[in-house]
């Protein structure tokens, strides 16, 4: 790959999936979203963004955090694009059997095509 092709590829925002589910810790969801949406390439006044985060819902319904905040996912897990990175926020909801099973099933389907998965 040439230098210019690599530079162009580096300027394309990396797609990041952030999982949302009932009982998510709101700060664990919103903290990474805030950081990712403000990250820019250094050295330029109007530098392109580094990341494009997307909230992934386990279903196509809205979900509620532990503290009662309501969220709506950008996409449901069954219809996700290919992500560079997937972030799994913490929360009491992951202790629920159904949520844990849906999350594990989705992560298994994504593992071979995602560069990294973090929590």
Image (spheres, helix red, strand yellow):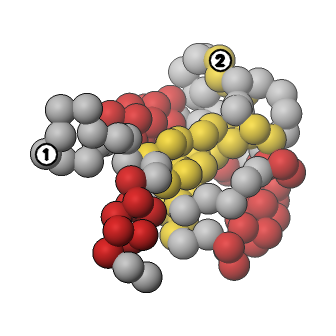
Question: Which of the 4 image quadrants contains residue 61?
Answer: top right
Residue 1 at x, y percent in the picture: 43, 82
Residue 51 in the image: above or below residue 68: below
Residue 60 in the figure: left or right of residue 114: right
Q: Residues within 10 Å of mark 2 (few under 14, many from 20)?
A: few
Q: Secondary structure at mark 2?
A: strand
Residue 5 in the image: above or below residue 47: below
Residue 63 at x, y percent in the picture: 72, 27
Residue 39 in the image: above or below residue 73: below
Q: Nearer the viewer, mark 1 or mark 2?
A: 1
Looking at the rendered structure, the number of numbered marks drawn on it comes to 2
Q: Nearer the viewer, residue 97 or 48?
A: 48
Give the residue drawn at x 58%, y 46%: 18
Residue 80 at x, y percent in the picture: 76, 51
State the residue position of label 2.
70
Residue 110 in the figure: left or right of residue 115: right
Q: Nearer the viewer, residue 8 or 96?
A: 8
Question: Which of the 4 image quadrants contains residue 114?
Answer: bottom right
Give the residue drawn at x 60%, y 40%: 54
Residue 23 in the figure: left or right of residue 84: right
Can residue 93 be spotted in the picture? no
State the residue position of label 1.
43
Residue 118 in the figure: left or right of residue 94: left
Residue 19 at x, y percent in the picture: 63, 46
């Amino acid at each position: 790959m040439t230098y210019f092709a690599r530079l162009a590829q580096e300027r394309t925002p990396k797609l990041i999936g952030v999982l949302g589910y009932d009982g998510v810790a709101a700060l664990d969801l919103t903290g990474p979203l805030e950081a990712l949406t403000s990250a820019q390439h250094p050295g330029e006044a109007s530098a392109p963004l580094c990341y494009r985060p997307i909230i992934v819902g386990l279903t196509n319904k809205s979900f509620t955090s532990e503290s009662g905040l309501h969220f709506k996912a950008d996409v449901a897990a069954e219809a996700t694009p290919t992500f560079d990175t997937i972030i799994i926020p913490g929360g009491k909801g992951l202790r629920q059997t159904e949520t844990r099973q849906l999350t594990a099933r989705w992560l298994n389907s994504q593992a071979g095509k995602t560069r990294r998965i973090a929590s």
